Image: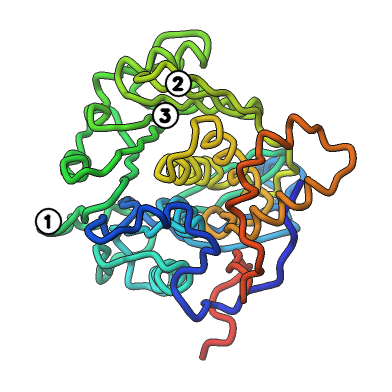
Amino acid sequence: MPADGEGRAEPFPRSGCHADSDPIAALRTPGAPPWDVYLTGNVFLDIIFTGLDSAPVRGTESWARGMGQSPGGVANMATALARLGLRTSLAAAFGDDHYGSYCWQVLEEGEGIDLAHSRTVPGWHSPVTVSMAYEGERTMVSHGHDAPPAEPAPDCPPRSRAAIASLAPGVREEWVAQAAAKGALIFADVGWDDSGRWDLAGLADLEHCEAFLPNAEEAMRYTRTDCPRAAARALTAHVPLAVVTLGAEGAYAVDGRTGETAEVPAIAVEALDPTGAGDVFVAGFVTGTLAGWPLADRLAFAGLVAALSVQEFGGSLSAPGWVEIGAWWRRIQSHEDQDPSALLRYAFLEDLVPESARPWPLLRAVPTIGFGQR
């Protein structure tokens, strides 16, 4: 069931963070880490085409019924975290072109994301991804160049409750161990292993992780199993908490310390654009973990926010806030034929969603950049 529709936002809201609920307010004590989550990575400008009837055909021109632009790449995760009320710090390189300025302004002024550890690189153009959504899937074409290496900063990574890393075979990122040493819980996902080795020993930073969140195919390949649930159980020999996403079937998780398991089905929605849904899922799971929710509630919440996100354009600006979550919760309760057991699964939201409406709507992806600018 889609959340209530909202009007267009002004280009940038008048204050940094517009989260309507703080899920970890009780933890905000003197001496606590200044940031809830730290992450680093590449920020792309995403150009998204939707409403395509089929994949583009060679030698023909395809017209899309919808188009949007928004910050992408690591910005997807950062925005999802900030909209769920987590104080988020991002270290990234930005081009000094118009695309880079736009992405910086959206993230810092529009979403309240801390960019103190980010930098603008003179003469470096922003990476760009063109995404085409059709038949519930997407095809992407990207272009970009590696940014020059940054000078190491003595206070980076900053002290935070959690950090999110994207693991790569054969690559060890020093900042992951440094963040863990400062007390951060490390949450990690992983991409496709182009080498074909699928060797867990090659994911060197897994030893620092609190949780590992691969999809079913990745999990089975890494563990040499033929069942995603067996794969999750096998992964707990390497990481305390394994979460395996099952696509249309939902997600399954195992806590290796307690033996607790949880499985939550996916929410069926009509997807406009699936870009960034996996990032939103991780953001939801991190939020629930920091808030201390039961494992099943964390999975349910992560699946819910991911489902709400695919009903909007773009990756970063499709992420829901608490008002959208509240609108969904109130709407599904109003259906007379609602399955009581399904409703009970999300009852924990009752004490979390805000009653009042946001004073301005969330910024959404728009077809162009620079309206009203001279």
Which callout, 2 or 1, points to the residue nearer the camera? 2
Q: Secondary structure at mark 1?
A: loop
How far apart are the two marked residues, 2 and 1, measured between alpha carbons?
A: 36 Å
- Amino acid type, callout 2: Val
Left or right position of 244 against 325: left
Q: Which residue is mark 3?
A: 192
Between 157 and 91, the one lying in front of the other is 157
- SS label for mark 2: strand
| Residue of label 1 | 152
* Left or right of residue 48, residue 198 in this image: left
Find out whether the residues at labels 2 and 1 contact each other: C-beta distance under 8 Å: no
**Residue closer to the observer: 27 or 61:** 27
Question: Which label number is shown at residue 189?
Answer: none
Q: Is residue 117 left or right of residue 271?
A: left
Where residue 282 sits: x, y (%)? 47, 41
Mark 3: few/some/many CA within 10 Å (<14, 14-19, 20+):
few
Q: Which residue is mark 2?
A: 254
Q: Which of pointers 1 and 3 indicates the residue nearer the eye?
A: 1
> Where residue 63 sits: x, y (%)?
73, 56
